[in-house]
Image (tube, helix red, strand yellow):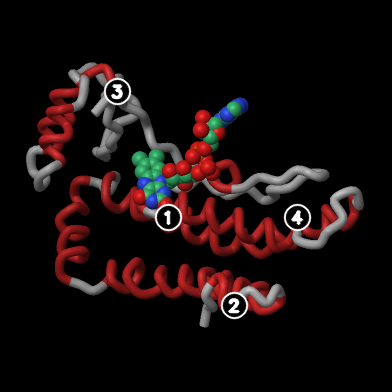
Amino acid sequence: MAWLEWWMLDAFDASREFTGDLHSTATSLGQAFARPLPQLIAATDSAHVQHWMIRDRKPLKQWSKGRATLVGGAAHPTSPYAGYGAGMATEDGYFIGRHLAGVDLSDYAAVRQALDAFEARRKPHTVRQSQQAYVLGQVFHHAPRALQPIRDAILDRTPLMQKVVGDSTPGSILSQLGEIDRAEARFTALLGLGEAHGSTP
Ligand SMILES: Cc1cc2nc3c(=O)[nH]c(=O)nc-3n(C[C@H](O)[C@H](O)[C@H](O)COP(=O)(O)OP(=O)(O)OC[C@H]3O[C@@H](n4cnc5c(N)ncnc54)[C@H](O)[C@@H]3O)c2cc1C
């Protein structure tokens, strides 16, 4: 194995400079984890252990200007607590392709209209997911010390997380994916490729 990339998260006070040894910090953070994480850390060259801050940005009001638009992390950077930033970047690729399909790219007004429609379609969903990720990061790592036992009791003993993350989030993600599946099925039928590509219900 030439190199290995992995990541771990820990609360960190941004006003302090990190002066510890990264490899030994990662080793101690990884101790409580199951195999093979501790072994992966041990096998990682210290030169490849990095430290960087997760930052949250307020949602952008506008993604597109002229003929250009933003997608993925540039449009809606999402902290890791959603586990979905890359998923949304991939979905963006699908939706922008769908909105631009059949548009004459030399027609400025038509391209503008398609980009506006793409944005309008994607913004509410991505804003919701990135804001939820921000809130989870705050709850997990930045709750005031006095409130931490209450937080832990709520997370351990009530169905709150299940309701917020386990029920409603998969629902809204599945509705996006369902839309992709239905459009794909229509395209497949239109092109008469049902047999060759397999049909989507
Ligand atoms: C610690 C961590 C864990 C994560 N875990 C998950 C997860 O479990 N599931 C999930 O779905 N998402 C996860 N994400 C989020 C996911 O990584 C991002 O949402 C995703 O990478 C965004 O993809 P992107 O292609 O839009 O942008 P990026 O992956 O950021 O790609 C942008 C690229 O552009 C390059 N670039 C930037 N500026 C320039 C320039 N001027 N010129 C040339 N190149 C440039 C960058 O180097 C980079 O390679 C995680 C993120 C982090 C930080």
Instruction: Tell whether label 3 touches label 1 (CB within 8 Å).
Output: no
Instruction: Tell whether label 4 touches label 3 (CB within 8 Å).
Output: no
Cα separation between marks 4 and 2 = 30 Å
Q: Earlier in the sequence, mark 3 or mark 2?
A: 3
In which quarter of the view is residue 6 placed? top left
Dot in front, 3 or 2: 2
SS under mark 2 = helix
Q: Which amino acid, by three-letter code, is at mark 3?
A: Arg
Mark 3 near ligand 1 (CB under 8 Å)?
Answer: no
Label 2 environment density (alpha carbons within 10 Å; few <14, some 14–19, many ≥20): some
Query: Residue at (47%, 59%) from the top-left corner?
Result: 129
- Answer whether residue 56 is visible to the viewer in this image: yes
Label 4 environment density (alpha carbons within 10 Å; few <14, some 14–19, many ≥20): many
Query: Residue at (59%, 55%) from the top-left corner?
Result: 92
Which residue is disc 2 drawn over? 194
Along the line of sight, which residue is nearer the eye, 86 or 191? 191
Q: Which mark is residue 115?
A: 4
Which residue is disc 1 drawn over? 84
Which residue is disc 3 drawn over? 16
Percent x, y of residue 99: 73, 62
Q: Earlier in the sequence, mark 4 or mark 2?
A: 4
* 122 on left or right of 21: right
Dot in front, 3 or 4: 4
